Each structure stands twice: as structure tokens, then as C-alpha cells.
């Protein structure tokens, strides 16, 4: 999956010849239901914290479309509401997010974008009991963000998103048996990215190239 993401990013950046790259921090609130430990449906909620790298094909140019990809580490604090009471478990994992955005507002200083995003994540739980417990989630939903261009090569981008996820849980109990269960989760996230833009990722870049091309055509005539 990481190789596919890298190929997509490189392909898009090659076509656009303009890009931004940097880092992000995010917080997410998760609620859902899963066949916990492969036994029965269990409600849960979680707080997620994530940090990683972000890539965007169009932060500032006056064109409609942008692709934004993120890949990073996440830490989660889960609470499962079992029949024996609440069970708190911490998890470490990773996630990737692919946003296909459309610039609704585009000016020299700001860009407001919205679009669908696909997220894939993995959580590995610390059970301290010899039981291996892993959650894998996959979902889609809307995301909206704002690019603030603070300098020629610097953009700060706060954003928010909602997604509905399909969830699969795999459990191996002390090496003597394993099982899987599935469920769903609602995910609400907000974060901020700090990106450094290439020299060609500027508001007037596309227009300037078009004017230069027109002048060349007129000269040839």
C-alpha cells in the first residue's frame, strides 16, 4: 500500500511540477461497535493522536484540483464497554489518508478546499497479557481545509474531517487460539499541517505560464 501511495504521489507531482511537503499533527475522536475479542458486539470510544508527513500537489496555484497524502504514526486510548465493565487499552499504529480536494476559494493569500478522503489505519494494542489484539480500519468521508500562505514558500493548513470506517479486529489469545470480528466506527478529526512549497506552487504560476505561451505563439506568427 505504501508503494502504491508513493507511486501516486510521484505521478501527480510530476504532472503538476508544483508541490508542498511538510508535517502534520492531528487529534481524532472515535466511537463505534466491534465484535470485541471475537465474542459479541461491544461499544467503544477512543482518542487518537497522530503525527507524520504530508504531501500536496497544489497549495497555492489558481487551479481547481489538489491531491493531499499523509502518512504517519498514531497513538490511541480506547475504552471498551464490556459486560464486566469498562476496559481501557492503549494502542500504537499508523495510518495513511488520501484527499482529493477542490479549491472553492482561491486567492493569493488563502485557498479553501473540500473533497472526499480515504483513510486506512492499523492499531496494535498493548494488552500486557500475552493476547495479541490488532484493529484494521478503512473508511471514507468529507474533509475541508484552509491553506494560509504566510510566505512565498510557507503554508499553514488547518483542516477537519468526518469519516465512516469499516473495522476488522484480529485477536490471538495467548498463542492457543485466534479469531476475527468486524464492526464500524465514526471518526471526527481535526489537525494542522505546516508545508513548504516549491517555487512553482504560487498563485500566479499557471496564469504566468499561459501568458508566456501566448506571447511565444504571437512571436512565431
Image (cartoon, helix red, strand yellow):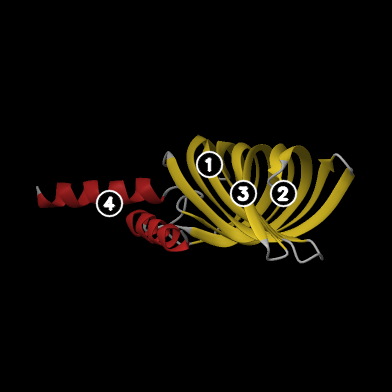
Please say whether residue 104 is visible from this viewpoint: yes
Please give the residue where the numbered disc 3 appears in the rendered image. 180
Q: In which quarter of the image is residue 76?
A: bottom right
Pick the front one: 71 or 103: 71
- Camera-near label (1 vs 3) is 3
Q: Decide if residue 2 is on the left or right side of residue 135.
A: left
Pick the front one: 84 or 142: 84
Which residue is rendered at x = 43% and y = 62% of the image? Answer: 6
Distance of label 4 from label 2 (alpha carbons): 64 Å
Q: Residue 220, percent across and down?
A: 11, 52
First of labels 4, 3 by sequence position: 3
Circle 4 SS class: helix
Please say whether residue 24 is visible from this viewpoint: no
- How many C-alpha atoms fall within 10 Å of the one at disc 4: few (<14), some, or many (≥20)? few
Q: Decide if residue 217 is on the left or right side of residue 101.
A: left
Pick the front one: 211 or 47: 47
Distance of label 3 from label 2 (alpha carbons): 7 Å
What label does residue 37 carry, if any?
Answer: 2
Amino acid at each position: 500500500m505504501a508503494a502504491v501511495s508513493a507511486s501516486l504521489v510521484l505521478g501527480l507531482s510530476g504532472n503538476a511540477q508544483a508541490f508542498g511537503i511538510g508535517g502534520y499533527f492531528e487529534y481524532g475522536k472515535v466511537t463505534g461497535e466491534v465484535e470485541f475479542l471475537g465474542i459479541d458486539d461491544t461499544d467503544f470510544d477512543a482518542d487518537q493522536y497522530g503525527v507524520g508527513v504530508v504531501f500536496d500537489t497544489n497549495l497555492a496555484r489558481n487551479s481547481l484540483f489538489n491531491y493531499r497524502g499523509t502518512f504517519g504514526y498514531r497513538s490511541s486510548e480506547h475504552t471498551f464497554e464490556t459486560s464486566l465493565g469498562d476496559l481501557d487499552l492503549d494502542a500504537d499504529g499508523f495510518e495513511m489518508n488520501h484527499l482529493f480536494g477542490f479549491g472553492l476559494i482561491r486567492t493569493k493569500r488563502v485557498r479553501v478546499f473540500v473533497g472526499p478522503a480515504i483513510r486506512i489505519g492499523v492499531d496494535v494494542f498493548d494488552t500486557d497479557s500475552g493476547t495479541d489484539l490488532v484493529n484494521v480500519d478503512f473508511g471514507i468521508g468529507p474533509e475541508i481545509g484552509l491553506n494560509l500562505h504566510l510566505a512565498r514558500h510557507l503554508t499553514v493548513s488547518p483542516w477537519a474531517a468526518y469519516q465512516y470506517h469499516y473495522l476488522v479486529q484480529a485477536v490471538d489469545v495467548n498463542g492457543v487460539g485466534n479469531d476475527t470480528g468486524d464492526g464500524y466506527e465514526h471518526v471526527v478529526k481535526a489537525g494542522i499541517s505546516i508545508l513548504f512549497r516549491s517555487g512553482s506552487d504560487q498563485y500566479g504560476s499557471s496564469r504566468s505560464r499561459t501568458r508566456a505561451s501566448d506571447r511565444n505563439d504571437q512571436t512565431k506568427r
